[in-house]
Image (cartoon, rainbow, N blue to C red):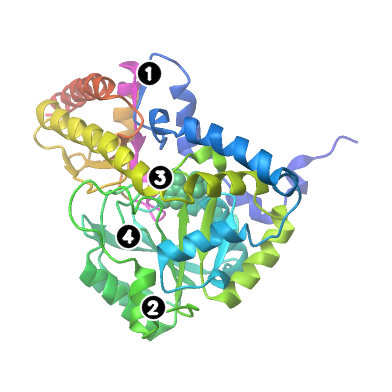
Amino acid sequence: MQTPWEYRYAHRTQKMGSSVIRELLKLTEQPDVISFAGGLPAPEVFPVKEFRAACQVVLDEHGPQALQYSTTEGHVPLRELIVRSTGKITVENTLITSGSQQALDFIGRLFIDRGDYVVVESPTYLGALQAWNAYGAQYISVRSDENGMLVDELEAALRVGPKLIYVLPNFQNPGGSTLTLERRKKLVELADRYGVPIVEDDPYGRLRYEGEDLPSVLSLDADYRGSTNGPYNGNVIYLSTFSKLLAPGLRLAWIVAPSEVIRKFVMIKQAADLHTSSFNQYVAYEVAKDGFIDEHVKVIRATYKERRDVMIEMMEEMFPSNVTWIKAQGGMFLWSILPEGMDSAEVLKRAVEKKVAFVPGAAFHPNGGGANTMRLNFSYSSPETIREGITRMGTTLKELINKKI
Ligand code: PMP
């Protein structure tokens, strides 16, 4: 008998959907479509030369170890590098993962039982929703503005008894918001008062194009507890990644958390993939060990700042006056708000006819809403392409808005 596949899948897979973004990325495969839809770094800034040299060194000096199975926790020199750049933690607080996306999945496995609540910003990162939907998570959305989560509204959410609070404090994907210092401190206090862990997802923190760097929620939580030098033993699970600092194809990221939580993640990772690629860890360490990333982020920042500024300049010129946006201080995305009642999914259909694509905002709102919002990526396209793409979008928006009136 032919397997009736539908009846054999595990219950939890019912809530698994294909990502809107993945579907849209298919559009970008057509060469004539200008895509602001994906979340890709600019390939021009990938440090190919440095990787070529590092591969050679790793193979010459550490060939057998780099090609062998390794420990689940990750390559110790790489973890020590992370300890030095994070501060207030020790190596026992770290775990190398195969991308932050894997860390999000592990968080789901470790914390989320079917029906559990997670507090999220509205909008929030789609990849986290995808990861946690598989474990049956439900979401309590807390509204946010250009300064991040409205933490004054967080307390009501915490009274519902959520398992986790998920925040993206720096240049949020998708909303482009940055959580203010005051709100970060309030978040730490509230999480402490209710004993709820904070998941701080920070892939973009070093990609700031204006304003002052702010302390991470992790480091504020360490201060709140009066700990200056690790081990860290607070409320925050911090995630970051080499995807935006070196290259996403490495699939290399890290978790910082209390050591007892790291030990649990290690067990989960053992079952999932034993360990992250040893070779990639050796090579990334070889590239990064003498401060290369500090120099390299300057190049990335200059490239992305120009692209962000061109996109904003063109939106000012081409978009109808009742379309607004949040000026992200860093990161890779601009978040744009259409007049109330307009549906960005409809706009996308028209935009694709004009060979330009973006992500409609509704998917980033797990409890509905946001139909009149859209996410535009500025890191991937060249300034000239951005000019052309925003011109096409401006024409589309004007046609639709005029038709409405
Ligand atoms: N979190 C956020 C907020 C992201 O934007 C991304 C990348 N799009 C990830 C996690 C996943 O990153 P990684 O490449 O490390 O899996």
The quarter of the rendered structure image containing the N terminus is top right
Label 4 neighbour load within 10 Å: few <14, some 14-19, many 20+? many
Nearer the observer: mark 2 or 1; the answer is 2
The three-letter code of the residue at mark 1 reads: Val
* Discs 4, 3 touching: Cβ within 8 Å: no
Q: Is residue 139 above or below residue 356?
A: below
Q: Report the span colored magenta.
A: 350-368
Q: Residue at x 22, y 64 (%)?
A: 180
* Label 2, label 1: how far apart the Cα atoms are: 47 Å
Which secondary structure, mark 3?
A: helix
Q: Is residue 255 above or below residue 38?
A: below
Query: On the image, numbered disc 1 is attached to which residue?
Result: 33
Which secondary structure, mark 2?
A: helix
Q: Residue at x 38, y 85 (%)?
A: 225
Viewer-closest of 184 and 243: 243
Query: On the image, numbered disc 4 is attached to which residue?
Result: 169
Query: On the image, numbered disc 2 is attached to which residue?
Result: 222
Nearer the observer: mark 4 or 1; the answer is 4
The three-letter code of the residue at mark 3 reads: Ala
Q: Position of residue 66 (x, y in %)?
A: 69, 46
